[in-house]
Image (cartoon, rainbow, N blue to C red):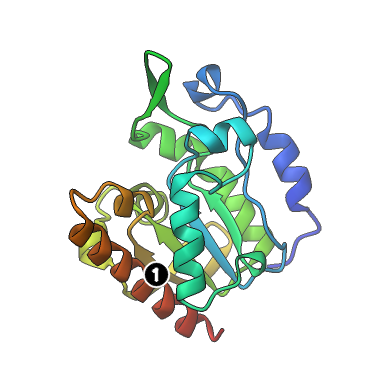
Amino acid sequence: MTTSVSLASIAKDAAGCTRCGLYEHTTQTVFGEGPQDAAIVMVGEQPGDQEDKQGRPFVGPAGRVLDRALADSGFDRSTLYLTNAVKHFKHTDRGKRRIHQRPDTTEIRACRPWLDDELRVIQPRLVVLLGAVAGESMFGTGYRVGAHKGEVVDAVLGDWHGLAVGTIHPSAVLRGPDSAARDTAYAGLVADLATARDASGG
């Protein structure tokens, strides 16, 4: 399906989103960015602290891991559209720090129309789901990263139909308890991204 609606106009609408209560405690909506004709869309879970402050996806520590993994798997980030399933940063304050909290199912569902709109406009060949929240947004509450990691599957979301590949969120690499665990997680992320690249024909 083609559409004359632009990502810029959807982003403008999303900037004032009040579909759930997360907007009350964040700096701004963090919408996706990248080419409107991108063949691949990467969907993360939600913005982090730096993303909330800067208004761009994947610009914090997890974004740096993703950038390295994209390069190691043969991707050029500038050709990809990057976004999140949830567009506001859910957190709890701990002193001067803001600690990430997982969005709940109600919040994921409230935000899904924005992802529907992004995919409807872009019509990518393939979507990479980075983490459990992204997977739940597309496939529902039964989605488990471990059960579907690295699989290429048919997927439908709203007016979009294409392929999807699930993998860990880059932040999972940072949470590894030691260097060996982090190296293993990173290698798996790179392998899954390479699978996505091959499946997309790119």
Task: Name the residue at 63% across, 51% down.
Answer: 117
* The image quarter in which residue 40 lies: bottom right
Would you name the residue on which mark 1 appears? 165
Tell which of 164 and 93 is nearer to you. Answer: 93
Task: Name the residue at 36% across, 47% down.
Answer: 133
Q: Look at the picture and state if 193 lies above or below 32.
A: below
The answer to whether residue 174 shows anywhere in this view is yes
Residue 165 x/y as whole percent: 39, 69
Q: Residue furthest front?
A: 179
The answer to whether residue 162 shows anywhere in this view is no
- The quarter of the image holding the N terminus is bottom right
Tell which of 174 and 78 is nearer to you. Answer: 174
Residue 150 x/y as whole percent: 31, 72
Tell which of 50 and 150 is nearer to you. Answer: 50
- The quarter of the image holding the C terminus is bottom right
Q: How crowded is mark 1: few (under 14 residues within 10 Å), some or many (20 or more)?
A: many
Tell which of 89 and 68 is nearer to you. Answer: 68
Residue 93 x/y as whole percent: 39, 17
